[in-house]
Image (cartoon, rainbow, N blue to C red):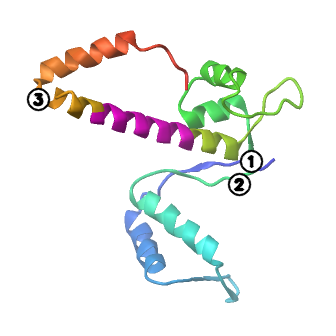
Amino acid sequence: MTTSTVTLPPLDHDSVAVVGRLLSHVPSARLVGPDGESVALPSEVHDVLIEVVAAMEAGQAITVAPVSQVLTTSQAAELLGVSRPTLVKMLDQHLIPYDRPNRHRRLRLADVLAFRQDRSSQRRATLAEMTRQAVADGAYAESADDYVTALADERRSAPYDVA
């Protein structure tokens, strides 16, 4: 199994900015070895490097992992931003596929990322619908205090949903 590590952005932001400028101004790049031998980077590698450098320029840490990677429940929970017990409930509800080759559950990274994307899309759609309904109901004409009270009432009445 291939593991992934988190790489923090370098303290020297200028060197990252230079690499970013170089990569963004050319359609492809070459890798030069210590002996002077060079090879053209495949466009897929070039594109990934552009994304990595852009994230580092923004001060973000980077994790590169193969999509076929298998995660533990703890790793998947961390990726989704939920507790491990909450993730286990999601698995028991068959919200994310998993394998159990022995007594431990294993999840494919691709499945976890797909679930995260679906959940994000559902949240955006729900927010858009709530906004549309609020506009239709004239809620934006209300005062901020009225809105806060209505939101608190809705949160108290909403059923618990782990997804």
What segment is highlighted magenta in the picture? 117-132
The answer to the question of whether label 1 and label 2 lie on touching residues, with beta carbons closer than 8 A, is yes
Q: On the rendered structure, is 139 left or right of 143? A: right
Secondary structure under the numbered disc 1 in the rendered image = loop
Give the mark toward the camera: 3 or 1.
Answer: 3
Q: Amino acid at mark 2?
A: Pro
Q: Is residue 131 magenta?
A: yes
Say which amino acid is labelled 3. Answer: Ala
The structure residue drawn at horizontal position 44% and vertical position 67%, both measured from the top left corner, is: 16
Which residue is situated farthest in the front direction here?
Answer: 136
The Cα–Cα distance between marks 1 and 2, rounded to whole angstroms, is 5 Å
Q: Which residue is mark 2?
A: 66
Q: Which residue is mark 1?
A: 69
- Residue beneath the point at 75% across and 51% down: 68
Q: Residue 42 or 163: which is nearer the viewer?
A: 163
Secondary structure under badge 2?
loop
Instruction: List x then y, in percent, for residue 139.
Output: 18, 27
Residue 119 picture location, percent across and down: 53, 36
Q: Secondary structure at mark 3?
A: helix
- Asked where in the image residue 74 lies, by quadrant, the reply is top right
Dots 3, 1 in contact, CB < 8 A: no
Residue that badge 3 annotates? 141
Q: Which mark is residue 6?
A: none
Looking at the image, which residue is at 42% across and 57% down?
11
